[in-house]
Image (cartoon, rainbow, N blue to C red):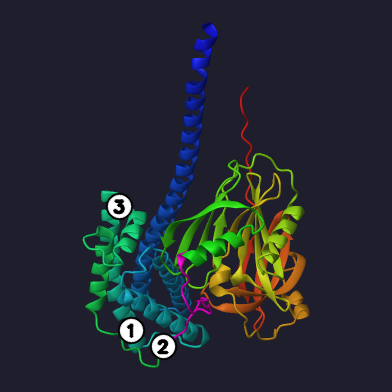
Amino acid sequence: MRNMKWRNWIVPGILVVALLGTGYWGYTEYKVRQDLQNRAESQYQRAFYELTQHLDTITGQLAQLQVIASKEQRILGLATMWRQIFAAQDNLGGLPLALVPLSKTEKFLSDAGDVSYTLLSRTTKQKEILEEKDAKVLGQLYQRAEALKEEMAKLGAKILNEELSWTQVEVALKEANGNLEDNTIINGFKLAEKRMEEYPEMETGDDFALVKPEVKIVRGEEKIDKAEAVQIADKWWNPKEEKEAINLTYEGVGDIPTYGMEIIPAKKEESPVYLDVSKLDGKVIWAMKPKDVAASNVDLSQGEQNCQEFLAGHNLYNMEPIHIENEDNTAIYTFVPRQGNVLLYPDQVKVAVALDNGEIIGFEGTAYYMYHRTRDLPLPKISENTLKNQLNPRLKVELIRPALIANDWGKEVLTWEVRGSYDKEKFALFYNAESGSEEMIVRLTPPPKFDFLLEE
């Protein structure tokens, strides 16, 4: 009788354990999705906050340029404004507003960028004073910048006070096919667009030639459908591995419309893989496999080799590693392609490696997708030997090589990259291959790491 009672508890006990296991698995899956949503929300919030800050700086610079008397200060002001405009355009493109008509707002930023870059080029070459017709154009831009800044400030206050969510706007916009009514965030941008429409078209004539950053977004001729995206995801991550299912989790909008995919592995103990497939030409531009990496058993050279094999498996050859970050037993490698012997810095990709077993757990190829193309590269006018003679003698030079970079103004420039050090500090210095002037200096010294001592 006692054995019968004991057996009566076995099945309920097994069911309880199974339910607890299912509940834990479901919670884990929910947490991963929630983390992805939080990641997107954080990126949108940051993009909007930075947009408001850039607009405020642009407005201030436009006013400041009206009162500046010296050539040196005008150069600094125009350079600052150009960078802020370029950043504001990037922030605006990073918000989930692809289906919202913002042509006037975008036209204002485009005009402001053209004017600032052209004036900067003129001022650096010859102009000592700002001509009256140039001041008039800057005044018109100031009026528009002030109006746009005011509307974004009002919207920002509402977002904070009402705790509005950008990801909810993204979903609602998609469901409404762009015709979303009575939404505070969307209405705020529509009101800003209406304010821009109140101003007449700016007539800049031939004085301000259109100057655009030397970038080219690669676009496919036809949009792929969901079924094609599933097939691409299935083949891309690990074509030899058996998968249990591939689900469409979301559809991203913005500069690069995407299908967000989730690959569920056949082995239950494995983590799912999340990746974004471009709707425009079916390229995978981002992928991640969440994983806790408890130990570091693989050295960085082996990790680099694993990255090279991974990239070659996706037809990304001739890639040069330019930077490695090592944190929490995970190494993130940055690679750039070569054209001949020139490194193409704008076209970079990042690959994450788990150092416990060398597994690839992340890929970021957005920059490569947007900018990679064959360039018509000029020959350097400054030779490597000539450059060596002008380097600071306190710099301990490690290597010199040709590299194409995007300078502070977003313009692509052929340079000589000089890697070197001073004492314990490491740097990459980029010198214009035509003029020899310093274009950019990047500090490469890794940040300090802190070990937390646990009290016994």
Q: Are marks 2 and 1 in contact (CB under 8 Å)?
A: yes
177 sits to left or right of 417: left
Please report whichever mark, 2 or 1, sits nearer to the chain's N-terminal start: 1
Q: Is residue 437 shown above or below 268?
A: below
Residue type of the residue flagged with mark 3: Leu
Task: Tell me which residue sits at (47%, 59%) in the image.
Answer: 260
The residue carrying pointer 3 sits among few (fewer than 14), some (14 to 19) or many (20 or more) residues within 10 Å by Cα, namely some
Give the label, 3 or 1, closer to the camera. 3
Give the label, 3 or 2, closer to the camera. 3
Q: Which residue is mark 2?
A: 208
Q: Which residues are magenta?
A: 210-226
398 sits to left or right of 120: right
Residue 45, position in %: x, y?
A: 39, 55
Residue 445 in sight: no
* Secondary element type, mark 3: loop
Residue 400, position in %: x, y?
A: 75, 71
Q: Which residue is mark 3?
A: 164
Residue 338, position in %: x, y?
A: 69, 74
Q: Is residue 241 shown above or below 189?
A: above
The one nearer the camera, 318 or 79, is 318
Residue type of the residue flagged with mark 2: Phe
Task: Tell me which residue sits at (42%, 61%) in the image.
Answer: 251
Q: Which residue is mark 1?
A: 137
Mark 3–mark 2 distance (CA, rounded to whole Å): 40 Å
Residue 358, position in %: x, y?
A: 71, 50
Q: Residue furthest top?
A: 1
